[in-house]
Amino acid sequence: MPLPAYKVRLTANDAITPSVRRLEFVFESDKPFSYTPGQFVSFLLPGEEKPLKRSYSIGSLTESTRDVAGFEIVIAYVDGGRATEFFFNAEPGLITEIQGPFGLLVMPETLPRRFFLVGTGTGIAPYRTMLPEIEKRLREEDCEIHLLFGIRSPEELFYGDDFLRYAQDNERFHAHFCYSRRLPEPPAPHDSLGYVQQRLSSLNPDPDTDLVYLCGNPKMVDDVFSLLQEKQFPTRQVKREKYVFSKF
């Protein structure tokens, strides 16, 4: 049985960093659409012989994800990428189709002692959708949550204010911004020079009690997974979602 498709209309297409755009969509049909924070949708884009399918995590920050009227995604520039060309030049009013939601990178039923959310670039988007649920769960469960966001330079940071606001309001939620090339001037306590791998290692994740989610650049995901294997993390305590940047 084919998956149901939903028609969506583009309402905003804004540059939020030199290489990332935020796109907002509303549903054109009356079919209800719900998702679990952390999931993604697949767009069906025009192709020469058959539609191209490209998947993007939902990045919306809303109190409810049930029967939503719309959603937002973030897209990173890929040189020569067909989806990049399509979306970066798309004008509000564009009608396209999606399928979904998909994905298992969602919050666990019971929080562990420490929960690490590790992302690079647009791989941070699914964690933004989790923030309202995180705030609720931290009131009910005893857990420390560490979000690690890897980017190259301050110009590439986005959604940072959202994560910092939640960190200021919730003493057991911690945001760490990891800059691989250049720190902000002056750097803040939550800023560090280096990769998310290094910051995660410094926090000493414990295979007996902790849970780690990984999302974004495939090399980062593989490197962190190798690091965790060295620390004897069981596979069930590491969830991975790689972003593959396709040109075709």
Image (spheres, rainbow, N blue to C red):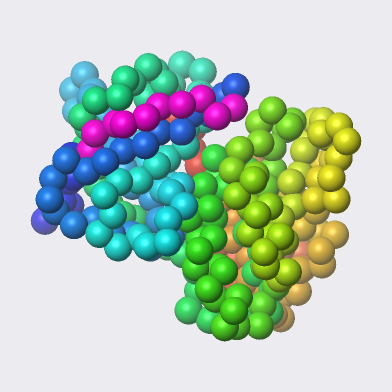
Residue ID at (29%, 31%): 10
In this figure, what is the number of numbered marks?
0
Name the side, left or right, on which 93 lies relative to 168. left
Q: Tell me the chief SS of the magenta region.
A: strand
Q: Is residue 116 above or below residue 74?
A: below
Residue 195 showing in the rendered view:
no
Between residues 42 and 91, which one lies in front from this camera angle?
91
Q: Position of residue 51 (x, y in %)?
A: 22, 30
Q: Is residue 193 above or below residue 4?
A: above
Residue 43 shows up from this direction: yes
User: As rendered, which of 141 and 76 lies closer to the eye?
Assistant: 141
> Is residue 58 found left or right of 187 in the rendered image?
left
Is residue 163 shown in magenta?
no
Residue 23 horizontal/vertical position (percent): 40, 33
The span shown in magenta is: 8-17
Which quadrant of the rendered structure holds the N terminus?
A: bottom left
143 displayed left or right of 76: right
Query: What's the residue at 73%, 32% (across, down)?
Result: 154
Above-or-below relation of 49 to 157: above
Q: Is residue 15 magenta?
A: yes
Choose top left, top right, bottom left or bottom right for residue 155: top right
Residue 169 spot, x, y in % from top left: 67, 64
From the viewer's perspective, is residue 39 above or below residue 246? below
Q: Residue at x 63, y 59 (%)?
A: 166
- What quarter of the picture does the C terminus occupy? top left
Q: Position of residue 29 (x, y in %)?
A: 13, 45
Name the image quarter holding residue 172.
Answer: bottom right
